[in-house]
Image (tube, rainbow, N blue to C red):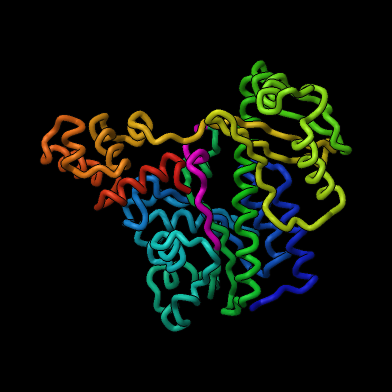
Amino acid sequence: METLTNADWQSLNEFLRSIYVPCSLETFPERIMAVAPGVIGTEISGFVSFSTRDVALPCISPHHVTLPQIVTFPDPAIGVAATAFTAQPENFFSHPLPINYLQTLDGQARAISDFLSESEFHCQEPSYKSFLEYFGIQDQMGIYIALPYTLKTSSTIDSFHRHQEHVCLLISRDRRNFTERDRLILNLIRPHLKQAYENIVAFHHLQHQLIEQRATTEQTALVTLSLDGTVKWMTRQAGEILHRYFPPSNAQTALPDLVQRWANNQIFAFSQGIEVCSPISPLNFELNGQRLSIRFSHSAESEAFYLLLEEISEARFSVEAIQQLGLSKRESEVLFWVGNDKTVQEIAQQLGLSDRTVKKHLENIYEKFGVHTRTSALMYALKALGILG
């Protein structure tokens, strides 16, 4: 089994610390790619964003992928050219890495050399002969992450990320020399990349609120902490939420003990340079069907730490929720009862329909979701509603 040296762990820790520093969504890809060479050698780094929202994976076709957006470092012109090149679906689908991901949904590190020999790769059309060869790229290794459903639909996300459901960090080299060490490092980076991206999106929403509607600041549940972990400032909304989840609570002046200890641990790790051994995941609590998610971030410039509190209603599998996926009310009712393990005959009796009509509704659902079976339709709906990860 491949192991890492102390130098590897040190550079990996520096990389992980840097990607958790708040920045804008527009600069996030460059931030990642700029620090990537310090932990894994690369001539060109790429950050790819694309969507498959109109298809139930792995039933995939070129017509079901929106145009990928690609940025590259250190030469951004390559990303512009790559975006234009992959605007043709057949070009995007000639590359073995996205094909493997879309077919398996396995985002672990994979290289072109895992799928094609050097001679096979050099004959590859059009990805190599029409593009990669021109830039001297002989191999690429990438990791993929699927974004949570709640991050897909925001109208406040900038043009690079809007409606994108998948992102990829791609490492390119002018020779075939990826090692199992490289693969291990990318796989260790992957969960952190996903968590950092989610944090950036959450704070982007907050920033958008503050810019567009400063008068609504008090409606945002935000806590500012000093370097020693004491509360410097807390919005009324944050105090009300904490009081509701942790009664009795002297919110507005101090945090509940459990939250305070968690925040102190995060602050200590950042201030002392302790290795980040696992993704800085939100602290979650549940109460009466609601989920409280507390996210941690910090600003080096202002020497302050922040807690962003978000209340989320637990995802429900209901007729009303299913309708949001583009189905009619009757189709939603049919799929709802499919989810309750009812047969066609039982659904027909429940809804006062004929068996033939129920089957017709199922055919319409399959067509809209791009699937072929009851199970695939149900899995699509559960994933789209955020009930199934």
Find the magenta span and give its range. 143-155
Query: Does 120 appear in magenta?
Result: no
Q: Nearer the viewer, residue 225 or 251?
A: 251
> In this rendering, is residue 48 above or below 267?
below
- Locate residue 147, reporting x and y percent: 52, 47
In the rendered structure, the answer to whether residue 274 lies left or right of residue 373 reads right
In the figure, residue 207 lies in which quadrant? top right
Asked if residue 151 is among those painted magenta in the image, a careful observer would answer yes
Total labels: the figure holds 0
Q: Position of residue 84 (x, y in %)?
A: 45, 54
Residue at position x 77%, y 31% in the image: 256
Residue at 62% of width from left, 33% of height from top? Answer: 292
Location of residue 352 in the rendering, given as x and y in whole percent from the top left corner: 15, 30
Placement of the N terminus among the 4 image quadrants: bottom right
Asked whether residue 292 is in view, the answer is: yes
- Foreground residue, 129 or 158? 158
Residue at 69% over, 65% down: 37
One can see residue 210 in this view = no
Query: In this rendering, is residue 247 above or below 367?
Result: above
Name which residue lies at 53% across and 54% down.
145
Q: Position of residue 263 (x, y in %)?
A: 78, 40
- Viewer-nearest residue: 307 or 318: 318
Looking at the image, residue 179 sits to the left or right of residue 259; the answer is: left
In the orientation shown, which residue stands out farthest toward the bottom? Answer: 119
